[in-house]
């Protein structure tokens, strides 16, 4: 079972699971996902899709061995558009998927996020850091929903002894990102390719650690296969400012677009880089795709998508 399997990361995970020879059922209400992301799996004997909101009860006939819970809009442009749905899928949706895992005796993996750290006061961020989150701000619907999802997962682990995994995903990029995603890289790619100014918020000194989607999926599967019940950070150790990323995209695309600065959004994190010691030592995982290689692959996709 893969909730959110029609999304950017979810669809790549589905590719990998079908590649393993697994039979997968994808649940997605397509608020932010797209059935086009699953086109290559259609007709496969190991693939089923159901348009379903997992905030509502989930019932499945037959055996289920694994539950991957990735459902949730995750872009800043989604936060004002779907705040209630985001809170519900992080709470009710997580509860429903955990209930399914318990009923079926399945292993459960929660796709959490670096947003649980908020605008961090500790750098880099280890899994032991409790975070600096504003529950009342515009990002609170997503940040707190994911923190609640982690609390639900730990409660089911402790009370019902469910075999659980938690992955905190840092900024991930690659093919199948929405062109209107609203995050920095899709914005930069679409703006550069269309000759529009690249929008950099604030002075552009805020940093992110960008992980190519293939590496992230590898980390998800390693966590599922050999992780424990405590959270794992998955993200790159290469930190880049948003201004430098904009310049890199301009150079890569050959665009003549200028850079345009706008006010920094409320609660936008200033620095993001994970401490991935646990993932490296327990899972043998680290990023293998360089930023230059990943950006080139992503650009090929956006040249067609824009």
Image (cartoon, rainbow, N blue to C red):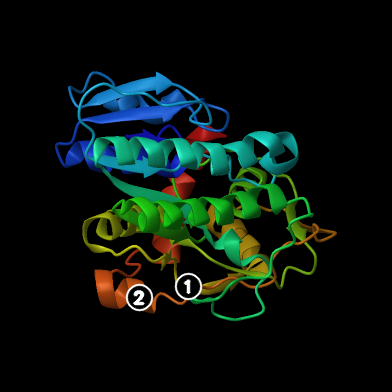
- Residue located farthest toward the left when viewing the structure as drawn: 21
Report x, y in % for residue 304: 49, 34
210 up-or-down from 105: above or below: below
Instruction: Kindly identify the residue that appears in the image at 64 percent across and 64 percent down.
Output: 247
- In this view, 36 is above or below 66: above
The residue that disc 1 covers is 127
Q: Is residue 186 above or below residue 57?
A: below
> Which quadrant is home to the N terminus?
top left
Please state the horizontal and vertical placement of residue 116, each as a whole percent of the image: 58, 62
Q: Is residue 71 visible?
A: no
Residue 268 at x, y percent in the picture: 73, 62
Choose top left, top right, bottom left or bottom right for residue 300.
top left
Graded by Cα atoms within 10 Å as few (under 14), some (14 to 19) or many (20 or more), the crowding at tag 1 reads many
Q: Callout 2: few (<14), some (14-19), or many (20+) C-alpha neighbours within 10 Å?
A: some
Q: Quadrant of residue 121?
A: bottom right
Q: Is residue 18 placed above or below 187 in the rendered structure?
A: above
Q: Residue at x 54, y 37 (%)?
A: 92
* Of pointers 1 and 2, the one earlier in the residue sequence: 1
Q: Secondary structure at mark 2?
A: helix
Q: Residue at x 79, y 54 (%)?
A: 136
Residue 229, visible in the rendered structure: yes
Q: CA distance from mark 1 to mark 2?
A: 9 Å
Figure quadrant of residue 72: top right
Side of 62 relative to 297 (left or right)? left
Which residue position holds label 2? 278
Q: Residue at x 69, y 47 (%)?
A: 141
Marks 1 and 2: CB-CB under 8 Å?
yes
Q: Where does the C terminus fall, quadrant-wise?
A: top right
Along the line of sight, the residue nearer the viewer: 193 or 138: 138
Residue 175 rendering spot, x and y as whole percentages: 44, 43
Classify mark 1: helix, strand or loop: loop
Given residues 60 and 276, the one toward you in this image is 60
């Amino acid at each position: 079972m893969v909730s959110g399997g029609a999304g950017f990361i979810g669809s790549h995970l589905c590719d990998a699971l079908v590649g393993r020879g697994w039979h997968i059922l994808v649940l997605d209400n397509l608020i932010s996902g797209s059935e086009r992301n699953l086109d290559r799996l259609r007709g496969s004997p190991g693939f089923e899709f159901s348009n379903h909101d997992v905030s509502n009860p989930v019932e499945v006939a037959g055996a289920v061995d694994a539950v991957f819970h990735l459902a949730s809009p995750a872009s800043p442009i989604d936060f004002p558009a779907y705040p209630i749905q985001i809170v519900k899928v992080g709470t009710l949706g997580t509860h429903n998927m955990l209930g399914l895992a318990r009923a079926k005796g399945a292993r459960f993996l929660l796709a959490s996020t670096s947003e649980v750290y908020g605008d961090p006061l500790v750098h880099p961020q280890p899994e032991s850091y409790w975070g600096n989150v504003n529950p009342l701000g515009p990002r609170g619907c997503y940040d707190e929903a994911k923190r609640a999802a982690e609390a639900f997962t730990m409660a089911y682990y402790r009370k019902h002894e469910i075999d659980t995994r938690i992955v905190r995903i840092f900024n991930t990029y690659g093919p199948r990102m929405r062109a209107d995603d609203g995050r920095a890289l899709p914005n930069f790619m679409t703006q550069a390719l269309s000759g529009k100014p690249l929008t950099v918020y604030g002075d552009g000194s805020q940093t992110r650690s960008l992980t190519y989607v293939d590496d992230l999926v590898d980390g998800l599967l390693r966590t599922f296969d050999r992780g424990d019940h405590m959270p794992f950070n998955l993200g790159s150790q290469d930190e880049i400012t948003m201004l430098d990323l904009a310049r890199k995209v301009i150079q890569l695309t050959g665009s003549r677009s200028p850079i345009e600065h706008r006010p920094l959004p409320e609660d936008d994190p200033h620095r993001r880089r994970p401490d991935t010691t646990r993932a490296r030592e327990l899972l043998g995982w680290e990023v293998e795709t360089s930023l230059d290689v990943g950006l080139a692959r992503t650009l090929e996709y956006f040249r067609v998508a824009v």
